[in-house]
């Protein structure tokens, strides 16, 4: 029965798959041309220790990221412990006491809420005020930006990915419209795109359509599954410099930070990232087709234009969530024997269940599924280093939760 379903879904997905392959080819060319033009060589893969002054591999990778994102500057570091850390560093770098931060995409991703307002040492404790513009039917309220941004607003946060919500991811065109609306009211208000899960999904990235900064994680799309840890910030030179001074110390900036054996993995991961992102996208399209046919509410639809690699599937209750995540875990190459349980994860308010039988701990560019235990009990599925693995995991999860109809 499931094998019939698989065949039907794959036939239906042919056009979407072709579109994904075209984007992957375009982005592979983009990465390759940066690596050729900037003359990457074996010398850049040498590890550094201590202060790591003059680490040419680290500095070259910053240049390559800047080139790919069409940004003035980039800060790519394994010293960022996660995407949240990179985003928090960008915000703390730019904002000063009495400044105002706004989110234009409703409530931000769970871990950023702690950074902004209710964690110890949050932006709020430093006297930074915060407001958010609610989404309307899952869309950014573009018309309201004019009156929402004021002369006091210093930074506007724009989340590209859906995060843990049923809204659609933003397209790069959406980001262009939002950035233009902000600048029309207050040219001094900087824009920061939370670019997690968005890299290489389209042919363009946020900086080239007007965003001032973008930041994300290296254990998602842009690390290609090989980066062992880290994050990045790209954008305007002055703002990236402010973030670098926040990551290290004022005056140290981007000139220190040992690579400790990681450089080749970051370069090689970047090189395969467009392809790996395409594998993950095909997995997401496939999952949408399968679970739609099983009667579940899904977002996005199989043939919808995608802005991130996430596929949301409303499973309706926590029992199915747990079954789904256990099936994905069970068909993972690492820790297949473990049974995920809901837990109080640092930075999240609701309990969260996560399936991540991954080579790099928690890397969600590898096939993974996670869900906060709250209405509408949607599971967020993403990643897959190979489409073959994604399909196997998805079919096993489909078998575990069964037909809704
Ligand atoms: C993953 C993610 C983050 C950062 O999460 P980390 O686990 O800290 O890397 C932030 N925003 C969105 C939308 C994300 O998907």
Image (cartoon, helix red, strand yellow):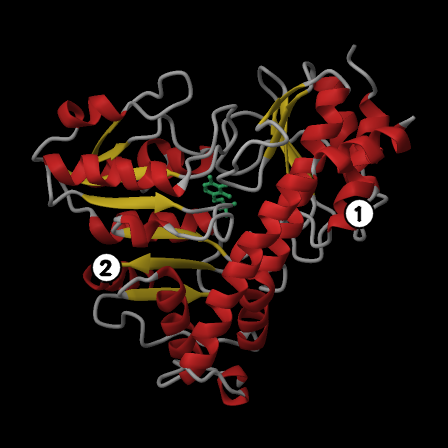
Q: Is residue 365 visible?
A: no
Q: Which of disc 2 and disc 1 is earlier in sequence?
A: 2
User: Which percent across, then down, holds residue 210?
Assistant: 25, 49
- Quarter of the image containing the N terminus? top right
Alpha-carbon neighbours of circle 1 within 10 Å: few (<14), some, or many (≥20)? many
Residue at 48% x, 32% y is 162
Question: Left or right: 193 with respect to 386?
Answer: left
Of residues 324 and 181, the one nearer the viewer is: 181
Q: Dot 1: what SS?
A: loop
Is the residue indicated by label 1 positioned so its CB lies within 8 Å of ligand 1? no
Of residues 377 and 34, the one nearer the viewer is 34
Which residue is denoted by mark 1 in the rendering?
332
The residue sitting at the right extreme is 1
Q: Position of residue 238 (x, y in %)?
A: 19, 62
Question: Residue 169: x percent and y percent?
Answer: 46, 34
Badge 2 local density, few (<14 within 10 Å), some, or many (20+)?
some
In this rendering, is residue 327 above or below 333? above
Horizontal side of 185 relative to 90 (left or right) equals left
Query: Residue, x 19% and y 36% (percent of image)?
Result: 182
Residue at the disc numbered 2? 236
């Amino acid at each position: 029965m499931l094998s019939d379903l698989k065949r039907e879904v794959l036939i239906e997905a042919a056009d979407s798959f072709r579109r994904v392959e075209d984007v992957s080819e375009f982005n592979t060319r983009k990465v390759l041309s940066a690596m050729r033009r900037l003359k990457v060589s074996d010398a850049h893969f040498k590890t550094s220790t201590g202060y790591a002054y003059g680490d040419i591999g680290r500095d070259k990778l910053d240049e390559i990221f800047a080139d790919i994102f069409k940004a003035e500057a980039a800060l790519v570091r394994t010293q960022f412990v996660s995407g949240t850390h990179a985003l928090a560093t960008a915000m703390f770098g730019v904002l000063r006491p009495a400044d105002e931060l706004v989110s234009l995409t409703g409530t931000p991703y769970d871990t950023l809420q702690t950074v902004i307002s209710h964690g110890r040492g949050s932006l709020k404790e430093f006297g930074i005020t915060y407001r958010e513009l609610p989404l309307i039917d899952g869309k950014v309220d573009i018309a309201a930006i004019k009156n929402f941004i004021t002369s006091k607003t210093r930074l506007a946060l724009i989340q590209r990915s859906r995060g843990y919500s049923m809204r659609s991811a933003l397209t790069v065109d959406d980001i262009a419209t939002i950035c233009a609306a902000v600048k029309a009211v207050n040219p001094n208000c900087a824009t920061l795109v939370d670019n997690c899960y968005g890299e290489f999904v389209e042919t363009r990235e946020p900086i080239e359509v007007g965003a001032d900064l973008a930041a994300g994680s290296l254990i998602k799309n842009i690390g290609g599954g090989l980066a062992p840890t880290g994050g990045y910030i790209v954008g305007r030179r002055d703002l990236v410099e402010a973030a670098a001074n926040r990551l290290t110390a004022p005056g140290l900036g981007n000139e220190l930070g040992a690579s400790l054996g990681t450089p080749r993995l970051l370069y090689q991961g970047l090189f395969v990232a467009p392809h790996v992102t395409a594998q993950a996208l095909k997995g997401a399209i496939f999952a949408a087709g399968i679970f739609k046919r099983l009667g579940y509410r899904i977002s996005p639809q199989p043939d919808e234009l995608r802005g991130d690699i996430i596929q949301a599937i409303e499973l309706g209750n926590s029992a199915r969530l747990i079954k789904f995540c256990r099936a994905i875990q069970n068909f993972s190459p690492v820790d297949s024997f473990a049974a995920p349980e809901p837990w109080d994860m640092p930075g999240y308010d609701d309990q969260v269940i996560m399936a991540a039988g991954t080579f790099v701990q928690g890397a969600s560019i590898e096939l993974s599924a996670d869900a906060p235990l709250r209405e509408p009990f949607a599971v967020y599925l993403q990643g897959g280093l190979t489409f073959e693995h994604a399909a196997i995991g998805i079919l096993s999860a489909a078998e575990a939760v069964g037909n809704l109809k």
